[in-house]
Image (cartoon, grey):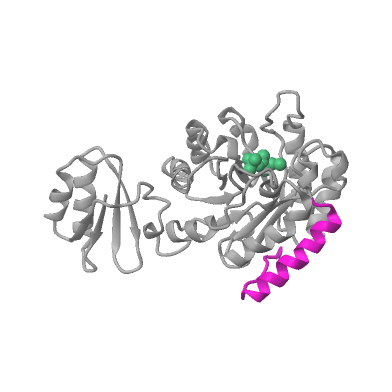
């Protein structure tokens, strides 16, 4: 439920409206749809609340057809959110490129990849230290050692660091090493995990679940925001395909669809969608053309020996060429690519 307030609603009237809603055991989010203040009711309002609110001074109208994700919905903010990750502004216009290996494997590997992606224009370093692997016998990540390597290379190159968090109990450790907490596709609906990343201070990179609808994706972001974290980016990474030609099917329409529904920045991960290196540059370019605020791209200095996702990882040279393509497409659609200050 959403109550739209009159443009001349006084502070005292607004306070009385909020008190009334809270007296029903509900929470409120006061936003601004651009013209008028909007009060979103968070929780499950009883049947009489709409009538009661309609009778209060300062209320212009009450809508029962509010989105079920009031905090992430477009109307809850004056405009699109800009999510600050260290010095990088995601959603401010220029395309933000986050790149790095699927998994952090060794000091030598991460140093080579960090230097390579920084030289080609990435502004953030990605890399998994805790890996959610389908098989328990696959490489599970270096854990703390991986986090230390990420931090060291982030500090050395100036790249911000994003890494996946797979369990609430890892957050206290991770928060000292990463600039952004990634929630992976397999965990998009782990609600306790979403709540836990919502309660910690770093911005969240939320990836779409393999079988998730857009509504479920938005509600997952709502979980993190409802727990208190105002900074989240949403990342489309492909959904379960019916055809084995690609690893997942990149839902490019997720970009404009999400842009119509949420103020949160939207990213594209062409790597996990493609599953195949040769397809990544064009999917990345498509993301830029579709209006994505950023890209998450896997890069490895020697993909043939990568411990995870080698077939979809770009070589350093391939990443450099892809950045050239991304820049050309950005320019063609009146955009630019973010650079480190
Ligand atoms: C990853 O980014 O390495 C990853 C595991 O991605 P996803 O959760 O989208 O599969
Ligand atoms: Mn991966």
Image point 59% across, 40% down: which residue? 185
Quadrant position of the C terminus in the picture: bottom right
Furthest residue toward left: 55
Image point 43% across, 57% down: which residue? 261
Inspect the magenta stretch and tell me whether residue 330 lies in it.
yes
Residue 225, picture quadrant:
top left
Where in the image, quadrant-wise, is ligand 2 located? top right
Judge from the rendering whether residue 214 lies leftward or rightward of residue 92; answer left or right.
Answer: left
- Pick the residue in front: 269 or 232: 269
Inspect the magenta stretch and tell me whether residue 331 lies in it.
yes
Residue 134, placed above or below residue 263: above
Judge from the rendering whether residue 208 lies leftward or rightward of residue 13; answer left or right.
Answer: right
Q: Position of residue 280 (x, y in %)?
A: 73, 55
- Pick the residue in front: 269 or 95: 269
Magenta portion: prevailing SS class:
helix
Q: Position of residue 241 (x, y in %)?
A: 61, 44
Judge from the rendering whether residue 58 lies leftward or rightward of residue 211; answer left or right.
Answer: left
Furthest residue toward front: 243
Residue 187, placed above or below residue 9: above
Image point 77% across, 67% down: which residue? 324
Residue 325, placed above or below residue 148: below
Q: Position of residue 46 (x, y in %)?
A: 19, 40
Residue 126, placed above or below residue 90: above
Image point 59% across, 61% down: which residue? 293
Using the rendered image of the protein, determine whether residue 113 is visible from the camera's viewpoint. yes
Q: Position of residue 235 (x, y in %)?
A: 58, 50
Residue 201, picture quadrant:
top right
- Pick the residue in front: 274 or 202: 274
* Magenta range: 314-341
Using the rendered image of the protein, determine whether residue 95 is visible from the camera's viewpoint. no
């Amino acid at each position: 439920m959403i109550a739209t307030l009159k443009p001349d609603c006084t502070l005292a009237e607004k306070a009385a409206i909020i008190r009334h809603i809270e007296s029903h055991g509900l929470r409120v989010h006061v936003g601004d749809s651009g013209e008028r203040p909007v009060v979103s009711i968070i929780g499950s309002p009883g049947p009489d609340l709409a009538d009661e609110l309609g009778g209060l001074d300062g209320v212009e109208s009450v809508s029962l057809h509010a989105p079920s994700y009031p905090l992430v919905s477009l109307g809850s903010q004056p405009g699109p959110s800009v999510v600050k990750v260290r010095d990088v502004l995601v959603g401010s216009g220029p395309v933000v490129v986050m790149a790095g290996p699927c998994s952090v494997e060794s000091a030598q590997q991460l140093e080579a990849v960090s230097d390579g992606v920084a030289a080609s224009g990435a502004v953030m370093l990605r890399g998994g230290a805790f890996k959610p692997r389908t098989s328990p016998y696959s490489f599970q990540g270096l854990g703390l050692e991986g986090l230390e390597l990420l931090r060291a290379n982030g500090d050395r190159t100036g790249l911000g660091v994003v890494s996946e968090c797979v369990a609430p109990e890892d957050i206290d450790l991770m928060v000292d090493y990463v600039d952004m907490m990634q929630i992976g596709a397999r965990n998009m609906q782990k609600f306790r995990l979403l709540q836990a990343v919502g309660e910690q201070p770093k911005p969240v990179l939320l990836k779409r679940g393999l079988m998730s609808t857009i509504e479920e994706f938005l509600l997952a972001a709502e979980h993190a925001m409802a727990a208190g974290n105002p900074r989240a980016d949403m990342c489309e990474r492909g959904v379960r395909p019916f055809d084995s030609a690609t690893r997942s099917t990149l839902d490019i329409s997720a970009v404009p669809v999400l842009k119509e529904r949420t103020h949160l920045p939207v990213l594209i991960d062409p790597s996990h969608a493609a599953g195949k290196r040769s397809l990544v540059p064009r999917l990345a370019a498509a993301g830029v053309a579709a209006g994505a605020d950023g890209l998450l791209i896997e890069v490895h200095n020697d993909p043939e020996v990568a411990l995870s996702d080698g077939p979809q990882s770009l070589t350093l040279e391939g990443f450099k060429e892809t950045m050239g393509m991304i820049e050309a497409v950005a320019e063609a659609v009146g955009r630019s690519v973010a650079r480190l200050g």
